[in-house]
Image (cartoon, rainbow, N blue to C red):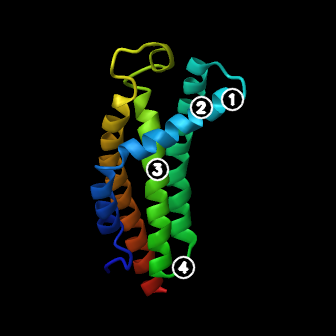
Amino acid sequence: MKSKVGFVKTTGWFSLAGLFIPGFTAIEIIGCQSLITLFGVECANSWTLLWSITIAGSIVLPWVFLRFIQRTSIETESLRKWLIFFNIIEYTLLQASLDSLFTNGQTLCYVSDGQNGLEFAFTGWFAIPIILLLSILFQQVQKAKLEQAELE
């Protein structure tokens, strides 16, 4: 049985856009880091805190969305909109999380070696295959759910 929502197809189209949006989401990430520093957290520590939050979020969000797919009975178009929303949030969370592998808060805050922030573009691109793999998983879960409904 074919899934009614083309998770992989929808995410594939998002991924094409994802090749061009890492700069926009990087601005969002830097804005979140700046917001944390406004609360009095030192700059380098604010990056560590932000990365901790985004790593947790990038792990928890797919699980939450998977549970949502398993339990929902919403229509195809509405589920597709939720998938796009998931893709945007997960892409941003992964982009920020993966950045912690390539730099540190000290470098981002206090060193001007010409690369500050450039790694955000690359980590945005690294997030795309992860999101595609998650969509394959979601598609399989949706397919199993539809097959189960047919048997009942």
Of 52 and 150, nearer the camera is: 52
| Residue at the disc numbered 4 | 74
Quadrant in the rendering for residue 6? bottom left
- Is any part of residue 55 visible from this angle? no
| First-in-chain label (3 vs 1) | 1
Of labels 3 and 4, the one closer to you: 3
Amino acid under disc 3: Glu
Using the image, tell me which numbered label, if any, was put on residue 90. Answer: 3
Q: Is residue 56 left or right of residue 115?
A: right
| First-in-chain label (3 vs 2) | 2
Mark 1, secondary structure of its residue: helix
Label 3 and label 2: CA atoms lie apart by: 20 Å
| Residue at the disc numbered 1 | 38
Q: Is residue 101 left or right of residue 49?
A: left
Amino acid under disc 1: Leu
The answer to whether mark 1 and mark 2 are in CB contact below 8 A is yes
Q: Residues within 10 Å of mark 2 (few under 14, many from 20)?
A: some
Amino acid under disc 4: Ile
Amino acid under disc 2: Ser
The residue sitting at 41% across, 30% down in the picture is 99
Label 1 and label 2: CA atoms lie apart by: 6 Å
| First-in-chain label (1 vs 4) | 1
The residue sitting at 34% across, 30% down in the picture is 118
| Residue at the disc numbered 2 | 34
The residue sitting at 44% across, 85% down in the picture is 151
Residue 44, percent from left and from top: 56, 18
